[in-house]
Image (cartoon, rainbow, N blue to C red):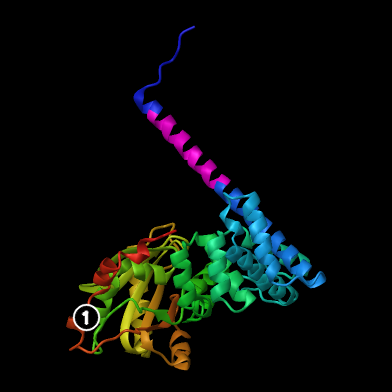
Amino acid sequence: MSKTNLTKAEYRDWLKEIKQRVRQAQVKAAVQVNTALLTFYWELGADIVTRQKKARWGSGFLKQLSQDLMAEFPDIKGFSYRNIKYIRSWYLFYSEGLANWATGCCPIEKQAVAPIDSTEKRQQAVAQLVQIPWSHNLIIISKCKEITEALYYVNKTMAHNWSRNVLTHQIESGLYQREGKAVTNFAKTLPAPQSDLAQELIKDPYNFDFLTLTEDYNERELEKALTDHITKFLLELGAGFAYVGRQKGVQVGEREFFLDLLFYHTRLHCYVVIELKTGEFEPEYAGKLNFYLKAVDEQLSGERDEPSIGILLCKSRDKVVVEYALSDIHKPMGISQYQLTRALPDDLKPSLPSIEELEAALGNPEGDDE
């Protein structure tokens, strides 16, 4: 019986497939190990709290427990006295908070859901906790004061696979308080599934504290600064945004118009036009953005693309004025404010190091993605 020899191309393709399967198996195994470990931590935390209540064991027994477990399992780092205390605190934070949360109407994603049994809600919440790394859990309980906010960040970490640094940044920037707070007309201009997703993606306000600008900066300087720091800007915008370009030209009639910033959202499958204004919102801004969206839909969007969305970022805005301005606009758009917390006087800016210089001097602390 003859043997069929594999060509080099066939072997390379097969080897590539094998490597991918190995990586998938490694990820799956790592997730399973993490889930099993954190499930054990949860049960251990419950045991500690129960025994301290029933047997009235003081805090001293935690040191004894740590010593005994480390003596039996010297290769396991999770049994240090410090980590045993973290396990107890983690369990207490959620067990006490979940009792009230599960009987209330505060879902993890801040959107309406069908009522479910309180026991089932608690079980679902615990099942999510053990899906993210232990270090992420510790960051969340150390920085969040209420259960709904904590579970929100647990859910977002699962959905977007955030690193510790990204998770810390999102909590400290107040993403939970800002997400979905922009004034928009999405409910009128987009179908229900698309409008809900679009509403979630826009924040108010946006936090541009990674920029260093003079007090009298103009729109072009703001635009250039954001694109110069595009990685941080994309992080602030949120998951799904892909940068297309700056000052993108569109031809309408015999005139050419230029979009401040153009993105494509991979989850919404549509273009996103961002216009920047350094002052207070004016009603005519909405009309101009509506015009830009019409041009993008006609000239750039493909057959499979959803309607383009506009985001107008202003230094300030009157909510009632915005609502009036959007009431008769037929293209989907949202109006948000932005914050610059590190604006500098002109005479000080040249004497201070840039963000890049500071990162280099500190050994690029943001490079640690563990």
Note whether 265 is above or below 147 in the view shown.
Answer: above
Residue drawn at point x = 40 percent, y = 75 percent: 310
Residue 84 falls in which quadrant of the image?
bottom right
- The three-letter code of the residue at mark 1 reads Leu
Residue 62 visible here: yes
**Is 23 covered by the magenta stretch?**
yes
What residue is shown with label 1? Answer: 352
Residue closest to the eye, 234 or 23: 23
Q: Nearer the viewer, residue 51 or 173?
A: 51
Image position, residue 183 (x, y; %): 48, 83
Query: Magenta-highlighted stretch: main secondary structure?
Result: helix
> Where residue 268 sits in the image (x, y, percent)?
47, 63
Q: Which residues are magenta?
A: 12-29
Identified at 66% across, 55% down, the residue is: 69
For the view shown, which residue lies furthest in the top direction?
1
Residue 315: within the magenta?
no
**Position in image of residue 100 (x %, y %):** 73, 77
Identify which residue, 92 or 219, lies in the foreground. 92
Q: Secondary structure at mark 1?
A: loop
Left/right of residue 16 with respect to residue 186 in the rendered view: left
Q: Nearer the viewer, residue 153 or 183?
A: 153
Residue 355: name its quadrant.
bottom left
Horizontal side of 180 relative to 290 (left or right) equals right
At which x and y percent is residue 92? 68, 71
Which residue appears farthest toward the right when viewing the image?
Answer: 54
- Up-down relation of residue 242 to residue 344 (above or below): above
